[in-house]
Image (tube, rainbow, N blue to C red):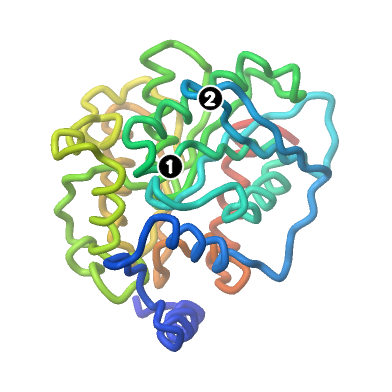
Amino acid sequence: MPLDPQVQMVLHHLSQTGDEELSFANISPEEARQSMVMSAYAEHIEPVKRVEDSYIPGPEGSIPIRVYYPMKERNTYPALVYYHGGGWVIGSLETHDNICRALTNLAECVTISVDYRLAPEHKFPAAVEDAYAAVKWIYDHHNEWQIDPEKIAVGGDSAGGNLAAVVSCLAKERQTPEIIYQVLIYPATNFQADTVSLRENSEGYFLTQEAMEWFKNHYLNSEADETNPLASPLLNDNLAGLPPALVITAEYDPLRDEGEQYADKLRNAGVEAACSRYDGVIHGFISMADIIDKGKEALKETGAALKNAFNTN
């Protein structure tokens, strides 16, 4: 279908500022990080009961986390461990603050946002190691956060969706922690993808193929990493036994098809996997929920799916 009118307005506004595409040809990772922090500013900050910044032990030092508690109080809460997007190179607790606030209230859960190590200072698999260590530590120390250890989910958007998928696979392989659900929002699943959506949406729709190459070259050590299932979970041949999933994709997103292929592969492996494509929108539309109504719809769908998985009422 045609581009959503609100998306058209966003792209038009970005074109006026020269930022209509994520172009990183001549920009450093630090400059890209600063740009993302500035663009993540939101006029409306959704209130939650409380927010706590903390640190947990990681493989190579402390991992910063931000913990959100919902308005509805409980003795113990279900939990969502959330990994932000940003191509494994940019993004932070700040850039995804509003997504985490919204999901905290919509799912009535504690949300733990994980500030994993970024590339190129810390290349693959550093982000994977931090992502897994975070959910394992939270599971093992659930009492410290009033968390029900039998109701822990993982989720993330874009690169964070990739990490959530990979962590689910690692948790199954290592038989700990127990993860009951995974939310994969326009996830990257295959560094060797050659899809229709990649070809059709490679330019002009915010996330470009050029940007994706920039992220990949900073994140991975070599071409050999592209086929590692810890980087490309779509290439994992053993998806049976993974937790149920919700996969959200966007029509005008280069990553659309590989996200949907991952949902299909989960289902073919016997995993319950819902897949929702939002027509007319672009990569990152959920981060733009303040100005794109379909972003709000996707957040509500995600919150409802988590609430159902947690079996809360």
Q: Nearer the viewer, residue 76 or 87?
A: 87
- In the displayed image of the protein, which residue is found farthest to the top? 175
Disc 2: which residue: 61
**Which quarter of the picture shows residue 257?**
bottom left
With 80 as the anchor, is 195 left or right in this view?
A: left
- In the displayed image of the protein, which residue is found farthest to the bottom? 16
Q: Nearer the viewer, residue 99 or 117?
A: 117
**Which quarter of the picture shows residue 111?**
top right
Please, what is the three-letter code of the amino acid marked with disc 2? Gly
Disc 1: which residue: 118
Q: Is residue 143 above or below residue 225?
A: above
**Which quarter of the picture shows residue 42?**
bottom right
Residue at x 67%, y 39% (from the top left corner) = 66
- What percent of the width, then of the height, locates residue 225? 20, 34
Q: Is residue 167 above or below residue 202?
A: above
- What percent of the width, then of the height, locates residue 164? 44, 35
In space, the residues marked 1 and 2 are separated at their CA atoms by 13 Å
How packed mark 1 is, by other alpha carbons closer than 10 Å (few <14, some 14-19, many 20 or more), is many
